[in-house]
């Protein structure tokens, strides 16, 4: 494959080798425009809303059965949380450019288009990806109006003075979420699931990761963006990684700048919430990040200053290593990697045993690669 257009950065200076995955479909069914919202079930909506407000969301609506949360940007809500017997990730909704795309996808998949509830508006087609996660593609939504946003700060850099006779005093208050940025999912059928998103939703890969010493087996993780043609899109809207069970990993929400992220983190800490990892700057995507656990144990991220790519850049390729997840910041934590002692790490360990007995992409060589990453 021609490497022309491959992006060059700290750890993704390589392009694909001949015969490797191209990172896009030649003729996708449609091309989604963006990630609209995520859906969860949780047993305690009151507790969920308290954390959500501390994290920086604004409540759109709250009933005994449903909580809708948003950022300040105009458009769709960020999260729809429904009351359920246990906490679980339900799936993602992607926004199509127009309703005819929803119809085309429905016809291609052999499922019906349906109308969304009146308070959301528009139409939807509900699909299932190969890992068993529900994927909703929507269009013609009722757009939420823009809210006052948290303003980015004005900085002095050396002799480039932009702030004179004025102080900088970021208040210790919740970061104000702008929008939903991306979701990360783990799957036992990584390549099959990746190809499904590329072929059906027209998404394209920004970066591939492979296990060190196993490049010939193909990638084990990908950062995937929406294809908006010449209009830049987030470096990744979806990230997929191979693992021993199908699960939600984390989701990320943009804030104004580093000060909003850091001061908001201080506020969360003051409220007794637990940081998982941060503050740092990622390599793939370049985002400044800060990860937190919500009361149900779900991992959520504040981010700022992420990369934006148009559709001309080909995927970067690099080996996966825990030490290669950040350009700077504290060492990656056991909690972020899912290795802290507790219920989730035990579930992951049990899933490793089960997955090795089943027909999927997670075999002994892949397990060895995953353990090597954890030690790195």
Image: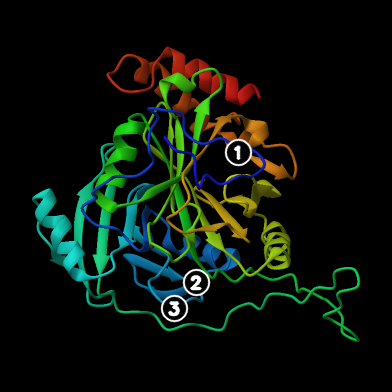
Residue 254 in the figure: left or right of residue 136: right
Residue 318 has which mark?
none
Label 2 Cα crowd, 10 Å radius (few <14 / some 14-19 / many 20+)? many
Q: Does residue 246 sit above or below 255 in this rendering?
A: above
Residue under numbered circle 1 = 13
Q: Quadrant of residue 340?
A: top right
Question: Horizontal placement of 110 versus 300: left or right?
Answer: left
Q: Secondary structure at mark 3?
A: loop
Asked if marks 3 and 1 touch (Cβ < 8 Å), the reply is no
- The x and y percentages for residue 347 are 44, 28
Number of marks? 3
Gap between marks 3 and 1 measured at Cα: 36 Å
> Which residue is identified by label 3?
74
Residue under pointer 2: 71
Mark 1, other Cα within 10 Å: few <14 / some 14–19 / many ≥20: few
The residue sitting at 19% across, 63% down in the picture is 102
Label 3 or label 1, whichever comes before in sequence order: 1
Q: Is residue 263 visible?
A: yes
The secondary structure type at the circle numbered 1 is loop
Residue 231 picture location, percent across and down: 44, 66
In front: mark 3 or mark 1? 1
For this orientation, the residue located farthest to the bottom is 165
Is 283 above or below relative to 228? above
In front here: 74 or 31? 31
Q: Between marks 3 and 2, how big is the CA–CA gap?
A: 8 Å
């Amino acid at each position: 494959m021609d490497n022309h257009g491959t992006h060059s950065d700290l750890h993704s200076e390589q392009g694909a080798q001949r015969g490797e995955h191209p990172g896009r479909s030649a003729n996708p069914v449609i091309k989604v425009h963006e990630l609209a919202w995520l859906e969860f079930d949780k047993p305690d909506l009151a507790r969920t809303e308290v954390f959500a407000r501390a994290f920086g969301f604004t409540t759109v609506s709250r009933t005994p059965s449903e909580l809708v949360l948003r950022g300040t940007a105009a458009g769709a809500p960020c999260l729809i949380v429904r009351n359920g017997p246990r906490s679980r990730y339900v799936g993602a909704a992607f926004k199509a450019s127009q309703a005819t795309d929803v119809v085309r996808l429905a016809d291609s998949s052999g499922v019906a288009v349906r109308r969304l509830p009146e308070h959301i508006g528009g139409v939807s087609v509900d699909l299932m990806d190969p890992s068993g996660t529900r994927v909703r593609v929507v269009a013609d939504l009722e757009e939420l109006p823009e809210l006052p946003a948290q303003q980015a700060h004005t900085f002095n850099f050396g002799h480039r003075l932009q702030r004179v006779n004025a102080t900088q005093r970021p208040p210790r208050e919740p970061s104000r979420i702008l929008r939903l940025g991306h979701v990360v999912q783990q799957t036992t059928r990584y390549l099959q699931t990746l190809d499904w998103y590329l072929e059906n939703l027209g998404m394209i890969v920004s970066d591939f990761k492979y296990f060190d010493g196993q490049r010939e087996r193909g990638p084990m993780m990908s950062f995937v963006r929406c294809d908006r043609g010449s209009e830049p899109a987030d470096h990744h809207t979806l990230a997929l990684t191979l693992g021993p069970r199908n699960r939600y990993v984390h989701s990320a929400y943009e804030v104004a700048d580093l000060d909003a992220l850091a001061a908001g983190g201080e506020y969360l800490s003051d409220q007794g919430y637990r940081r998982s990892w941060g503050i740092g700057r990622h390599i793939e995507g370049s985002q400044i990040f800060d990860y937190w656990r919500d009361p149900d144990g779900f991992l959520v991220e504040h981010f700022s200053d992420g990369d934006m790519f148009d559709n001309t850049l080909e995927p970067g390729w690099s080996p996966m290593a825990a030490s290669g997840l950040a350009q700077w910041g504290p060492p990656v934590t056991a909690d972020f990697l899912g290795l802290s002692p507790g219920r989730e790490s035990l579930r992951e360990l049990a899933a490793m045993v089960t997955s090795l007995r089943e027909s999927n992409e997670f075999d002994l060589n892949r397990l060895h690669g995953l353990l090597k990453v954890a030690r790195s």
